[in-house]
Image (spheres, rainbow, N blue to C red):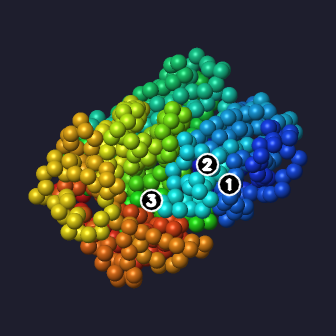
Amino acid sequence: MDFGYPRPQLQRKQWQSLNGPWRFCWDDEGRYASPADISDWPMQIQVPYPPESAASGIGDRGFHKCCWYEREVNVAPGNDRVILRFGAVDYQARVWVNGRLAAMHEGGHTPFWADITRMLAPDGRQRITVQVIDDPHELTKPRGKQDWQLEPHSIWYPRTTGIWQTVWIERVGRVYIDKIRWTPKVEGYMIGFEARIAGNELGDDLSVEVELRHGERLLARDRYRVVQHEVDRFVVLSDPGIDDYRNELLWSPERPTLIDARIRLLDGETVLDEFTSYTALRTVTILRDRFMLNGRPYNLRLVLDQGYWPDTLLAAPDDAALRRDVELAKAMGFNGVRKHQKIEDPRYLYWADRLGLLVWEEMPSPYRFTRTAIRRLIREWTEAIERDYSHPCVIVWVPFNESWGVPDLTAVREHRHAVEALYHLTKTLDATRPVIGNDGWESSATDIIGIHDYDANLDHIRQRYGGENKTDQLFDRRRPGGRILTLDGYPHRGQPIMLTEFGGIRFIKKPEAGVTSTWGYSSAMDEETFARQYEALLHTIIHTALFSGFCYTQFADTFQEANGLLTADRTPKIPLERIAAATKISATHIPGVV
């Protein structure tokens, strides 16, 4: 059960995984208020698998509002600081160390931590207890595809409660670097570096040393003075000028060149903190109707990926499974994925960075519009952007999907204001990436117009989006679900138009255990029919000049939704080479576009 280093862009040597067996109990009646109230632990769970999953050892998919975890760990006190970290806990968590409250966090998809140094027992035996509240019927929290009914139905899947990403401890100095941030700027052949220093014992001669390397080649070694607990500088690389030489250092799916970094915090010449990181020279922009990667038009070939596994649900089985998903997407000819309704494990982003796969990051939706829902959405979305800002693979942010959580965009101005506010907030937090305010339809604030259309009739697709249709006529027509593509007062501004959901061909290669009925948006009865339908559909979409990119539904079967190119256990339904041949013809339909 190897999950790899849980925070790949800030790796220290001294860390300890707390994944594995924990004591566990349900608390549906809310009987317990603190660890002291619990005398009986009737179950054991394997962390980080959620209790609804088979891999957890619990496998209980019933309605449960509250649960508790506990385990002991050997951590000796010392002169350094001990930080307890959680990758993701769904939804509200309270953490105690040796009976003392250490942390509280709300949000099911983002990390949190606690400095537990002063709570450690002198004998080195530490007791960690976690309470999780996750009301299965609460629709105002960002929950993505987690079903509120007892059994999965339609496009909704089993719930994920509690700890579902790595729990770990790291040791740091009394003064240490708490956060870093990388911002590449290809136009100036430079990389922005930010560091935030934590600790109350800051000296007068603190500095941060940044060393950047590509393989054995030293690119830069700079040292910056810490001012007011931070460093914020651009590292300017030696610019070769000519494109051929420049391209050797640029990151892309075809050449995922990473720049390795070593960061040291010093007091004079004394090293207080040291760790490794990585970054990349990569820029993403919009130019008129085209998506641009590193200043060149780039055609996006994406596949929708929901990030579920049969036995572990939202949690990955292990680090190898995350790597394999990236490899499979690339093997099918895609240059990117749209992570649908999930903030994915950072280890997936690490493999996408290292192997070369673009990622659209999408916020899991709440399903009621209330002030509480919007506050929760804003807080967790802000945390997600902060967590993943430095990953070169992340190229687009998507705060809303198909008007979920804002169902009355055409009639209720507060709903429209929410989408536009999240769009502008995202642009404020990250000015370097495009943002899609509401993917699918009813756009009012967006850098890319995403269209969802599952019509399996190829003649309809050609008539609807073909060259004879004027763009203004397209946006005046109503589309799937009776939804308009853009709201009144938001004319098309010439930005890229992409078909960001289509396909969804149902073909059952191997029935999934426990799933009694399946569905898709269209169907194929055998492998050859499935292959030909995929090839014909991709050929039509690719040769529709209106689209500057696409996202096919979907990567793998997900419970009752049997419309994946792979089965739920990642077995290809038809040869990967045949899928890739159909997917990759998109590289030829626009001259000069990769």
Mark in front: 1 vs 3: 1
Q: Residues within 10 Å of mark 3 (few under 14, many from 20)?
A: many
Res. 419 image quadrant: top left
Q: Is residue 594 left or right of residue 71?
A: left
What is the spatial separation of the Cα atoms under label 2 and label 1, in whole angstroms?
9 Å
Q: Secondary structure at mark 3?
A: strand
* SS for callout 2: loop
Residue 181 visible in the shown view = yes
Instruction: Report the front residue among 316 and 178.
Output: 316
Q: Amino acid at mark 3?
A: Asp
Density class for disc 2 (Cα within 10 Å; few <14, some 14-19, many ≥20) is some
* Disc sitting over residue 305 in the figure: 3
Tell me whether the residue at label 2 lies in contact with that at label 1, contact meaning CB atoms closer than 8 angstroms: yes
- Can you tell which mark lies on residue 63? 1
Type of amino acid under label 2: His
Quarter of the picture containing the N terminus is: bottom right
